[in-house]
Image: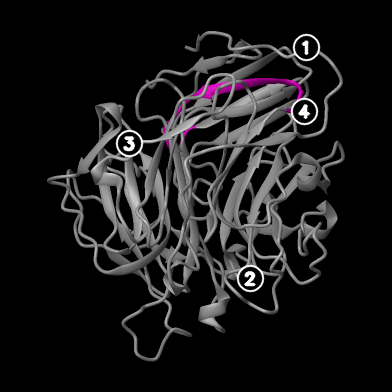
Amino acid sequence: MLSRALIICAFPAVALAGPDFRPVSVPEHVYDGGWEHFVGGGVASFDCDGDALPELYAAGGSNPAVLLRNRSGAELAFAADTPEALALTGVTGAYPLDIDRDGITDLAVLRVGPDVLLRGLPGCQFAPFEGLGFASGDHWTTAFSATWEAGQSLPTLAFGTYVDRSDPDGPFETCDDTLLYRPEGDHYPAPRRLIPGFCALSMLFTDWQRVGRADLRVSNDRHYYVRGGQEQMWAMEEPPRLYTAEEGWRPYALWGMGIASRDVTGDGFADVYLTSMGDQKFQTFDPTTGGPSYQDATFARGTTAHRPHTGGDGRPSTGWHAAFGDVDNDGRDDIFVAKGNVEQMPDAAMDDPNTLLMQNPDGTFTEAAAQAGLASMARGRGAAVVDLNNDGRLDVAVVNRRAPMEVFQNITQGGHWLLVDLTEVGAFIELKVGETTHTREITIGGGHASGHLGLQHFGLGQAETAQMRVIWPDGTATDWQSVTADQIVTVPRP
């Protein structure tokens, strides 16, 4: 049964305005380091002090990672308050998840070096987990995802390693393997290597076919695998195996940086947006084949974002973190992409502003980052597109390489909204708004080294009510309930 929380605010039923963001001053933090930190630079967003406002834990590379405590009211505000356990160097990214299911968020921290699982404690304190058996070697980790498999109390963890730095023939054609930690009861045995590995930069466990089992999608960087590699989808069987072309998987190679997943077409199945060097790929799910088939819809939808849209640099763009989100609350998901040159790659744009693709009523997208105030020229990497002060508007935080982290407050006068308090990984939210049904899968992974755990945001347009239900990972569903706009709705775990 759904319970309703305090209504935070309500927007008047006026014509929707274009997106509008303003920069917010935050404690200075820079993601820096040598070539091993050309990639990475993620940020985790999650509430660690119980006030329902998400903190930001930002990777620092050669600098210590930092925890920015959320002190927001009507205006966004953050204070640096990093406990010793989080002030790690070599951090490339982090993902929040409740590993021991005690109701306090934990962290999977990705590093150049041993990865770390940190147990969340009250008051935003953290400590290494004891007794899980988790052991990590000296890897270069650049991707992560997690899911709960049937019958397990601990999550299955996947760590995507990049280039094998110990290979004297590297770095080209020396991609390292994905490491899969499948629990056995209350502990983790040694990881299983998913071979071949093609230099993963993003991965996502997703129940793409909605049968109660999440498979592992991996986006790989052809810059280092050079040839013979491709994007991957691992069927989580025993043992895991790659889907084949005969099953509907279409081999595809790109400079894969990030994965975003959302049902854009409204058929109940998630579509994907893949960032890359040169252009970004939007692929819609094709349910007719019975397998993991995705049709390229990039040019038809206008989502290539292949060159800078302002600044005068005509060379190809480099996309990193991508996220879907309805930034103007018109009921249609938009796409944010953090962009920036790897370092000094001469064939790619140096002045490479972030992208904000606004979805039009016909399902196409139009670039609006410059108009919205998000077109930073810093070398963007990881990002968070979340409501940072629970006013119903999605804000943006971006970690930059060799430049200060940026936070932008959304001040758009848009439509109505809903925030859903649901963190059960593998659950689906279905929200009917008029004739449209929004389907949202709760996942951990994707993006570029950046993850969110917390309130799920929906834009409702001019609708003041909606119908909502939750489908739990075991397939059971709540009854459809009427929910009122402009509030936080809590869905208790069964």
Q: Quadrant of the C terminus?
A: top left
Residue lying at the far bottom of the rendered structure: 169
| Real-space Cα separation, disc 3 to disc 4, in angstroms | 32 Å
* Residue where numbered disc 1 is placed: 12
Q: Nearer the viewer, residue 20 or 63?
A: 63
* Residue where numbered disc 3 is placed: 98
* Residue where numbered disc 4 is placed: 330
**On the rendered structure, is 306 left or right of 247?**
right
Magenta extent: 412-427
**On the rendered structure, is 248 left or right of 200?**
right
**On the rendered structure, is 67 left or right of 330?**
left
**On the rendered structure, is 265 left or right of 257?**
right
| Marks 2, 4: nearer the viewer | 4
Position above or below: 258 against 323: below
| Marks 1, 4: nearer the viewer | 1
Please state which amino acid type lies under the numbered disc 2: Tyr
Occupied quadrant, residue 258: bottom right
Position above or below: 323 against 11: below
Identify the secondary structure beneath mark 4.
loop
| Real-space Cα separation, disc 2 to disc 1, in angstroms | 46 Å
Residue 44, x across and y down, in percent: 44, 43
- The answer to which of marks 3 and 4 sits earlier in the sequence is 3
| Real-space Cα separation, disc 3 to disc 2, in angstroms | 34 Å
- The answer to which of marks 3 and 2 sits earlier in the sequence is 3
Q: Nearer the viewer, residue 356 or 201?
A: 356
| Real-space Cα separation, disc 1 to disc 4, in angstroms | 13 Å
Mark 4, other Cα within 10 Å: few <14 / some 14–19 / many ≥20: many
Image marks 2 and 1: residues in contact by CB distance under 8 Å: no
Mark 3, other Cα within 10 Å: few <14 / some 14–19 / many ≥20: many
Q: Disc number at residue 252?
A: 2
Image marks 3 and 2: residues in contact by CB distance under 8 Å: no
Residue drawn at x 44%, y 46% is: 213
